[in-house]
Image: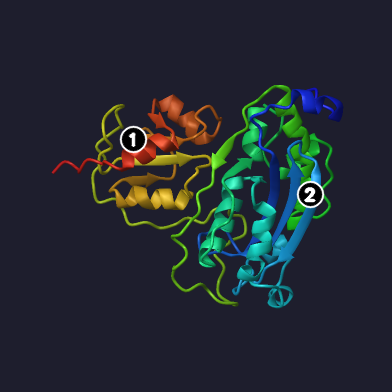
């Protein structure tokens, strides 16, 4: 794959590409909606992916730090760190007017947006770009979609994995050649809208220091127990017809609306959130129907209907009652 050099950048750069990026990494107490940020790093890049500056901070989560064996930040280290509201303005200044770039960007954006919501504010971010999605758009020959694999592909050396500043540096160095490869081929960048959150501004009390973390070794996303759907499954969704209470809806990939909020709205509408795709699944919601995730592959094999997030949110507005 040929990558643009600096001499050809100005003449060949797609006009529709963003004018600046904020490459972000956050380390957290866990992966659930009530978990907190313990450190954050931002590398600001110009339109061609060149580094302008970088910034790093610890954050006191006011609770148990969670997976110390991963991020290495103990309660003693974090005790004197600033609270999130104290660094919110500086963080926002680093993000303002730029596309947020992260590896698994949905997670980083959710954690950041929730912290700002708790601080009764909002991050000045309008779009995000996931480097996993960009690697898929470029068909990079990666063995998997871990950051270390992306880094190795571009010859970037990791020094301190799971340290926010080094992870952000590694991602910034891997993002620049990815961006240049996309520009050379005029590839559409996989940009998604970032919507500020308000649902966490007045949430329940958060666990204090010493409380049990929601993170568990060997897990990526903790399971969230929901009440069983009270309605029988009426079968598959049919195009141009409304959803019906009891339908089983599965989600795959990144979404503009926070995934858990989208799932909450699904349950509130009387639908069942399915963790996997089976022959009984009524509908798969994904913004990347051509991806090779297990859910999209199963949906194809079963003939499960697929819609994108925008279409699904429209359908949620008018869900038919279950058969009486």
Q: Visible in this render: residue 171?
A: no
Q: CA distance from mark 1 to mark 2?
A: 42 Å
Q: Quadrant of the C terminus?
A: top left
Q: In the picture provided, is 26 more to the left or to the right than 213?
A: right
Q: Where does label 1 land, which residue?
A: 282
Marker disc for residue 301: none
Q: Position of residue 115 (x, y in %)?
A: 56, 63
Q: Is residue 145 in view? A: yes
Q: Nearer the viewer, residue 53 or 78?
A: 53
Q: Residues within 10 Å of mark 2 (few under 14, many from 20)?
A: many
Which circle marks residue 169 in the picture? 2
**Relative to residue 159, is residue 84 depicted above or below?**
below
Please indicate whether residue 139 sits to the left or right of residue 239 in the image.
right
Q: Residue furthest left?
A: 324
Query: Residue drawn 31% across and 32% down?
Result: 237
34 to the left or right of 140? left
State the residue at coordinates (69%, 39%).
19
Residue 265, relative to residue 206: is it above or below? above
Of residues 272 and 128, the one nearer the viewer is 128
Quarter in which the N terminus is drawn: top right
Q: Which coloring applies here?
A: rainbow
Q: Is 61 situated above or below 47? A: below
């Amino acid at each position: 794959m040929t990558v643009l050099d600096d001499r050809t950048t100005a003449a060949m750069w797609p006009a529709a590409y963003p004018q600046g990026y904020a490459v972000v990494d956050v380390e957290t107490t866990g992966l659930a909606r009530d978990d907190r940020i313990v450190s954050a790093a931002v590398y600001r890049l110009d339109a061609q992916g060149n580094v302008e500056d970088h910034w790093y901070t610890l954050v006191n989560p006011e609770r148990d730090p969670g997976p110390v064996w991963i991020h290495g930040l103990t309660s003693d280290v974090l005790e004197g760190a600033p609270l999130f509201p104290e660094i919110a303005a500086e963080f926002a200044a680093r993000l303002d007017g730029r596309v947020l770039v992260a590896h698994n960007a949905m997670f980083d954006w959710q954690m950041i947006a929730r912290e700002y919501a708790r601080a009764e504010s909002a991050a000045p971010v309008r779009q995000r770009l996931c480097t996993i999605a960009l690697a898929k758009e470029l068909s990079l020959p990666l063995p998997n979609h871990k950051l270390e694999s992306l880094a190795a592909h571009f010859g970037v050396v990791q020094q301190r994995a799971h340290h926010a500043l080094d992870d952000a540096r590694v991602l910034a160095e891997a993002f620049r050649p990815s961006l240049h490869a996309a520009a050379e081929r005029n590839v559409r960048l996989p940009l998604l809208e970032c919507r500020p959150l308000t649902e966490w501004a007045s949430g329940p009390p958060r666990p204090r220091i010493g409380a049990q973390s929601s993170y568990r070794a060997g897990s990526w996303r903790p399971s969230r127990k929901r009440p069983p759907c009270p309605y029988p499954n009426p079968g598959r969704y049919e195009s141009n017809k409304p959803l019906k209470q009891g339908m089983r809806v599965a989600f795959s990939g990144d979404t503009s609306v926070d995934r858990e909020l989208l799932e909450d709205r699904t349950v509130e509408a009387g639908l069942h959130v399915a963790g996997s795709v089976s022959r009984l699944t009524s509908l798969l919601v994904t913004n990347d129907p051509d991806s090779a995730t297990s859910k999209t592959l199963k949906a194809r094999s079963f003939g499960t209907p697929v819609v994108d997030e925008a279409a699904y949110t429209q359908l949620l507005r008018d869900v038919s009652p279950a058969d009486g």
